Image (tube, grey):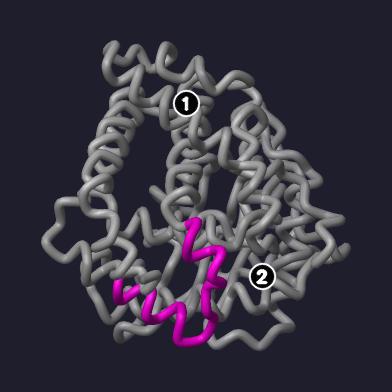
Amino acid sequence: MSLSEFTKQAVSEQWSFLAEATFELTAQGSSRAVYFVRASEHQFVLKFYAATTAIAQIHYEHSLLTFLDSAHLPFAIPVPLQTASGETFIAVEVDGQLLNAALLPRLVGHPMERRNLHQIQSAGFALATLHNALAEFDPQGQYAKLPFWGALDRIHPQVSDPFTVPQLLQLGLEEQRHLNQLLNEAIESSPELYATLPIQTIHADYITPNILVNQDQVVGILDFEFATRDLRLLDYMSSLDQLASFPWQEVLFEEIVRAFSTGYQALSLLTLAEMRAAISVWKLQRASSLVYWTGWLVEGKGSRQKIVDAVVETLRFETWLQSNQRKWLDALGCV
């Protein structure tokens, strides 16, 4: 997505200090375009939301970031900069399409490494810190706009029936059978999980590109676009899944799981119910992610092969779990 001079002018009219700024498109963000902006000695991030992102969700995200800004966290978060009129985002025309855009400070740090155990432990501790703060935001769930990730028939408007995913991905018969079994287990377990496990505001995209580190310590957390009210354990397992599960054959698998869990539980302990539900929530997280990514594919945003690869790895890891469950739970600190 390119920015015309007309678009740049429209942006600088709202944030006047960008009058002489330079704009550089980055590879960040899978659902929207992101630009690094340089203005004199200062650096910013200009984020364009996807046309499908509801205005209510943008308001929710920005309210959450403003709340966290007052929580005195030990790491930085990207609080939107207000325009002269006090708005935190604007509508601007880009390539003939009207998109919402927000200007954020560019945080110092670099994305964490998936195989650095010191950084992984720090990431676990930072997530616990974040969860403690997020628990105080919208505790009754009055303002969250997104559906629970456990509602597989609602998490993406293009996939109202999760059991169509195997066909949409054109999987082989055995993979279809196995994936349908995973989807069925996730759907059947979801009501009890939501009835018995802690629910609060979560980040919902706490993965390595969104975790900035410096000298092996987390110094910034990005991308709260998917933040919502959901299972606390879902956030935990989703992050750990991205760190350790792919490739799950990694020789440091147990060390990664243990480092993340040690960091998290140094500040916030999982409940007994969460420990017992760890595998069920992991399956729910994987199932919901595959449904959501398939929705992206239907929208023309994703790569079919990447999603199919994720399905294959998910099914292989689930098979591995059947004979290595105790080892995995022990590394989680659940046994």
Does the magenta portion include 261?
yes
What stretch of residues is rendered in magenta?
258-277
User: Element at badge 2?
Assistant: loop
Q: Which residue is mark 2?
A: 79
| Comes first in the chain, label 2 or label 1 | 2
The residue that appears at 28% across and 61% down in the rendered structure is: 326
Residues at marks 2 and 1, CA–CA distance in whole angstroms: 31 Å
Relative to 245, 48 lies left or right: right
Q: Name the kind of residue labelled 2 in the image.
A: Val
Q: Position of residue 116 (x, y in %)?
A: 23, 73
The picture quadrant where one finds residue 210 is bottom left
Residue 294, numbered label: 1
Q: Position of residue 235 (x, y in %)?
A: 53, 59
Q: Is residue 317 magenta?
A: no
Classify residue 72 by image quadrant: bottom right
Asked if 226 appears above or below 296 in the picture, the reply is below
The residue located at (53%, 55%) in the rendering is 234
Q: Quadrant of residue 268?
A: bottom right
Place of residue 77 in the rendered image (x, y in percent of width and height, measured from the top left): 58, 73
